[in-house]
Amino acid sequence: MTYKTITLRRGKADSLKRFHPWIFSGAIARTDTGIVEGDTVRVLDETGAFLAVGHYQIGSIAVRVLSFEDVTIDSAFWTQRLTEAFRLRQALGLVGRGDNDIYRLVHGEGDRLPGLVIDVYGETAVMQAHSVGMHVERQAIADALLEVMGALVTNVYYKSETTLPFKAGLGQHDGFLRGGNPSDVATENGLRFHIDWLKGQKTGFFIDQRENRSLLERYSRGRHVLNMFCYTGGFSVYALRGGAKLVHSVDSSNKAVDLTVANVALNFPVDHRHEAYAEDAFKFLDRMGSDYDLIVLDPPAFAKHKEALRNALKGYTRLNAKAFEKIRPGGILFTFSCSQAVSKEQFRLAVFTAAAQSRRHVRILHQLHQPADHPVNIYHPEGEYLKGLVLQVE
Ligand code: SAH
């Protein structure tokens, strides 16, 4: 296979030599004629020496690198990369367990597959393309996926309507690439969840909070829990199993509240400890009393881009300040940011500012992050996005 080539400007190959998997458009000196979005291209330095092979796209990130070796991107390549990803999840003890069949199989750059996410929910894999190149390759990837997963996966749902660049004009519709009509219930740490891969956010569930939900369970006994930004109610269900006295779930979306109620019912059919509210977080925090002694704040990404950073940090401070103001003495606060643009240090500073405003004594008990099935490629620190603090408030 002879791929078209892209030649970089002099001095623009340094980050590639450090294995960073993105090439920005400003680094490009010239491209072969006829290259279209989604093409696999070979990247050369100004002397014509080979640097990398990757997917070309129009935009600030012009190439997402698939390999730093001069390989052909064929079915053997996809099988090889997916096998590596699968072996890691096996090593993590996530595969073949009776009490857990939810995990992330492919986490973009973290699995050397930039632009691709694959989440496993029981026998269904939900595949999401974030680049045109991965979209172009979706059928080959689906074939490799079924080959690697064997009997573990029988359905492949493709969910990329909202993650592909609109301007590429792909007219993409979500749907099954393989199989269809699966059960929509999967199991995480022995708890069952309806997964809304058809219409839900991300691939239907926030797998990245799995270990943090387990930690919350251990703090739940006898507590009054507020799960703010509950989405599918993950934290709420763990809190109920952990022996919480009551659990209140809040989300501004009616659909999220319905999902939470359904997931609570799935695990605790007759349980009057739980109530859910469809309400704006800030309004709820303003009007609520001071009875909660375990609060979860897991908001959506406040900063999707670097430009939005300042306002995002203010938002985190404002939100956390309300929790510090109201949480019962001795209470525990689980507070998160999933904004990639916000660093661990910046988030901690925003929360510190909120704590200082409340003048309360606050201790850091745990510093949380994304789990190992969302690995960070060491050459791509941008892949580290989820951070959290568990705080005790006197
Ligand atoms: N904690 C969840 C994930 C949260 S995702 C889990 O473990 O799965 C963020 C959620 O915040 C979404 O469900 C979204 O509907 C909700 N949300 C966004 N803005 C909000 C607001 N202003 N008030 C309350 N909820 C909001």
Image: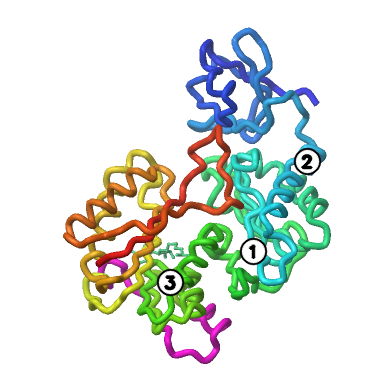
Q: Which residue is mark 3?
A: 219
Mark 1 and mark 2 lie on one chain; the one further toward the N terminus is 2
Q: What's drawn in magenta, residue-wise?
A: 261-284
Q: Count of labels shown?
A: 3
Q: Measure the C-alpha gap from mark 3 to mark 1.
A: 23 Å
The disc, 3 or 1, on the residue closer to the chain's N-terminal end is 1
Residue at 71% x, 42% y is 137
The answer to whether residue 373 is left or right of residue 61 is right
- In this rendering, the answer to whether 370 lies above or below 52 is below
Mark 3 or mark 1: which is in front?
A: 3
Rendered location of residue 140, percent (x, y): 77, 45
**SS assignment at label 3:** helix
The dot on residue 102 is 1
| Viewport quadrant of the C terminus | bottom left
| Residue 269 part of the magenta-drawn span | yes
Residue picked out by circle 2: 80
| Residues tagged 3 and 1 counted as in contact (Cβ below 8 A) | no
Mark pair 1, 2: CA separation: 22 Å
One can see residue 275 in this view: no
Judged left or right of residue 28, residue 303 is: left
